[in-house]
Image (spheres, grey):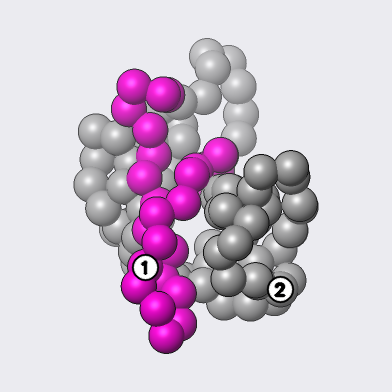
Amino acid sequence: SKANPIQIRLAVPDSDAINVNAMDIGWGGVSFAIPKDAPNFNIGDPLYLDINLPAYHWLSALVVVKHITAAPEAVCIGVEFSRVSENAYKTIMQYVTAKLPEGSFG
């Protein structure tokens, strides 16, 4: 939600981590928007993310870029979880399940 958003920090090689705007999160991955002037990424690139889920805590994940879509003000990137600790994955599953509309299946 806008009042309590998911926070994502993207580790950028040879640079400081950047905060990116989370768009969606699911059991298999997450999507986010980065500014057009941010470093370029390619499909298949591994990335390291720190993710803060509202009402939970920060967790870390190694992800792989699966989709890249250019938008007027930003670049939208979809990534798939590659390496996530068992505890972090359980937290993601709890968060996603809690956010599903009643009767939905992820």
Quadrant of image for the C terminus? top right
User: Does the magenta portion include 20?
Assistant: yes
Left or right of residue 3, residue 10 in this image: right
| Sequence-first disc among 2 and 1 | 1
SS assignment at label 1: loop
Q: Residue at label 2?
A: 42
Is residue 24 visible in the rendered image? The answer is yes
- Highlighted range, magenta: 1-29
User: Residue at image x 30%, y 35%?
Assistant: 54
Q: CA distance from mark 2 to mark 1?
A: 18 Å
Going by the picture, which residue comes out furthest to the front?
37
Residue 13 x, y percent position in the rendering: 45, 82
Q: Nearer the viewer, residue 37 or 97?
A: 37
- Residue 83 sits above or below residue 100 on the image: below
User: Residue at image x 56%, y 64%?
Assistant: 38
User: Residue at image x 74%, y 45%?
Assistant: 71
SS assignment at label 2: loop
